[in-house]
Image (cartoon, rainbow, N blue to C red):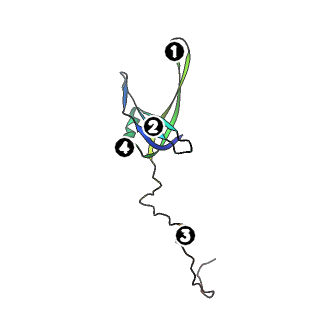
Amino acid sequence: MEVQGRIKMIGETQTFGSNGFRKREIVVTTEEQYPQHIMVEFVQDKTDLLNNYQVGQQVKISINLRGREWVNPQGETKYFNSIQGWRIEALQSEAGDANVPPVPPADAFEPAGDLQEEDHDDLPF
């Protein structure tokens, strides 16, 4: 699965417990009729993937949905969901890529007006 949007926030890497579990959160705002602020967590060595990104960038994040069950001390079962990222890539803005020439507007071309009936074209069809 994937989430696309603009980076709203990138958190610091957090370390938990004696085993050194690491987690880093990023919030991406989707660009749709009703924008959503989606928090995605990157864990362990994947936390370093966020180092080259900054707030405001358009990104696509590959995610996995995770769910877990927990029984509290009173014996009640609770369920928790998380969104884990495993890849992130920058998206090109609509302003254009430097390697792709801009498309001229449709009215930039005018029909040729000096064609003669006897002019021969060499098209094979």
The image position of residue 36, as x and y in percent, is: 52, 39
Query: Which of the image's four quarters has the N terminus?
Result: top right
Q: How far is mark 3 from mark 4, CA to CA?
A: 41 Å
Residues marked 2 and 3 touching at CB (< 8 Å): no
Does 60 sit left or right of 113 as displayed?
Answer: left
Secondary structure beneath label 4: helix
- Say which residue appears at 39% left-offset and 34% top-offset: 11
Determine which residue is flagged by label 3. 107
Discs 2/3, front: 3
Q: How far is mark 4 from mark 1, CA to CA?
A: 39 Å
Determine which residue is flagged by label 4. 52
Residues 21 and 76: in front is 76
* Mark positioned earlier in the residue sequence (4 or 1): 4
Q: How far is mark 2 from mark 1, CA to CA?
A: 29 Å
The image position of residue 5, as x and y in percent, is: 49, 44
What amino acid is labelled 3 in the image? Asp
What amino acid is labelled 2 in the image? Val
* Mark positioned earlier in the residue sequence (3 or 1): 1
* Mark positioned earlier in the residue sequence (2 or 1): 2
